[in-house]
Structure formats: structure tokens, C-alpha cells
Image (spheres, rainbow, N blue to C red):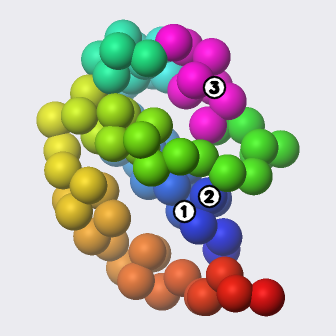
Amino acid sequence: MAVKQAVVERFRQICAERTIRPNELANLAGVTPSTVYSMLDERRKDISIVTIKKLCDGLSITLGEFFSTPEFDALEQEIQ
């Protein structure tokens, strides 16, 4: 799994647990809905750490809490 895919899956997991839709996440985070939908788009390859931080702030979680999962620990190096 790539880093971007892991980030998207983590946001989907948290939103599903809290029954939050993408538009609601955008409102909570103070970003536009297009920012959230762009992040969820599989064709987009990258997501900025600033965007991740804003979304985490909207969900009232730290970056440490967001990234502290076995999925992130198991990611392969991205060096090619």
C-alpha cells in the first residue's frame, strides 16, 4: 500500500467510525469540500502534510494519533 492510499483509508476509517461525510469533514477542518474530495480521489498522487494536519485538527486528533496505526508502521520505503 502506498502512503497516499494509507492516508485516505485512515481518514475513511475515522469518518466511518464517527459517521462523518466528506462535506462535514471539510466544514470541521475549515477547508473546502473540493479539498477533501481531491484528497479522496485515487488519481491524485500526493497530499500535503498541511492538509492532513487541518483535517486532523477538524477531527480533534493529533498527527501522532492519526499516524499511529499498524498500517503506517508496515508501509514500505518510497525510495525508488
Quadrant for residue 1, please give it.
Answer: bottom right
For disc 3, the neighbor class at 10 Å (few under 14, some 14 to 19, many from 20) is: few
Q: Residue at x 51, y 12 (%)?
A: 32
Give the answer, above or below, for where 58 lies relative to 23.
Answer: below
Contact (Cβ within 8 Å) of mark 3 with mark 1: no
Numbered label attached to residue 37 = 3
Type of residue at label 3?
Tyr
Q: Secondary structure at mark 1?
A: helix
Spatial CA distance of label 2 from label 1 is: 5 Å
Q: In the rendered structure, which amino acid carries the disc numbered 1?
A: Ala
Of circles 2 and 1, the one toward us is 2
**Horizontal and vertical percent for residue 6?**
54, 62
* First of labels 3, 1 by sequence position: 1
In the picture, which quadrant includes the C terminus? bottom right
Left or right? Give the position of 1 relative to 59: right
Residue 78, horizontal then vertical, whole percent? 66, 81
* N-terminal label among 2 and 3: 2
The residue positioned farthest toward the right in the image shown: 43
Residue that label 1 marks: 6
Q: Give the side of residue 28 with respect to residue 80, left or right.
A: left
- Say if residue 17 shows up in the picture: no
Q: Distance from label 2 to label 3 (Cα)?
A: 14 Å
Q: Are marks 2 and 1 in contact (CB under 8 Å)?
A: yes
> Circle 2 is placed at which residue position?
4
Q: Nearer the viewer, residue 13 or 75?
A: 75
The residue drawn where x is 63% and y is 16% is 34
Start-end of magenta stretch: 32-39
Q: How crowded is the residue under tag 2: few (<14 C-alpha within 10 Å), some, or many (20+)?
A: some
